[in-house]
Amino acid sequence: MIEAILVTGADGYVGWPVLLRLAETFYDERVVGVDNFARRKWVEEIGSVSANPILSPGERKKRVEELGRVSFVEGDLTSREFVNMLIRVYKPDTILHLAAQPSARILR
Ligand SMILES: NC(=O)c1ccc[n+]([C@@H]2O[C@H](COP(=O)([O-])OP(=O)(O)OC[C@H]3O[C@@H](n4cnc5c(N)ncnc54)[C@H](O)[C@@H]3O)[C@@H](O)[C@H]2O)c1
């Protein structure tokens, strides 16, 4: 049976490079990235942009498809149903939980 590593926050500053490194390092495991792209929405909401140039969600999904064995699943981890589905479908042996709202949102 294929073992799986789940990376939450896989579109994030930490999560994206971790996802790529795991995919390059663990050839026998399936690597699954999860994100709801909330960070991008929050940045856009305040009229800001990423300080580092980053690929669009579509370009990142294409990149992981090219790697094979890597899946990118869009969804909200605050949904119990979504999390249960991830565990049921991908049966991860390891979960790297990097999804977060790492700083307070700016409320105007
Ligand atoms: N960046 C750093 O230098 C650094 C240093 C030490 C620790 N950390 C910790 O690492 C973790 C990740 O930090 P980061 O800098 O990568 O943050 P980030 O905002 O770049 O990434 C977090 C990701 O989580 C996603 N996310 C948020 N809520 C979600 C939800 N409900 N469902 C699905 N996805 C969701 C966001 O869309 C985002 O892509 C945080 O816990 C942070 O405190 C970061």
Image (cartoon, rainbow, N blue to C red):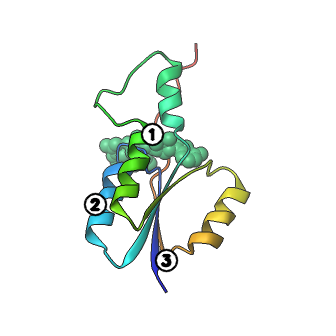
| Number of numbered labels in the structure image | 3
Tag 2's secondary structure? helix
Residue sitting farthest toward the bottom: 1
- Mark 1 nearby-residue class (10 Å; few <14, some 14–19, many ≥20): some
The answer to whether the residues at label 3 and label 1 have Cβ atoms under 8 Å apart is no
Name the residue at 40% across, 48% down. Answer: 62
- In the picture of the structure, the residue carrying the numbered disc 2 is 21
**Could one spot residue 91 in this view of the protein?**
yes
Name the residue at 40% across, 56% down. Answer: 65
Name above or below for residue 29 compared with residue 63.
Answer: below
Question: What whole-number distance in Å separates the C-alpha atoms at marks 1 and 2?
Answer: 18 Å
Q: Which of marks 3 and 2 is nearer the N terminus?
A: 2
**In the picture provided, is 92 more to the left or to the right than 55?**
right
- In the picture of the structure, the residue carrying the numbered disc 3 is 93
Name above or below for residue 75 compared with residue 87.
Answer: above
Identify which amino acid the numbered label 1 is placed on: Pro
Identify which amino acid the numbered label 2 is placed on: Arg
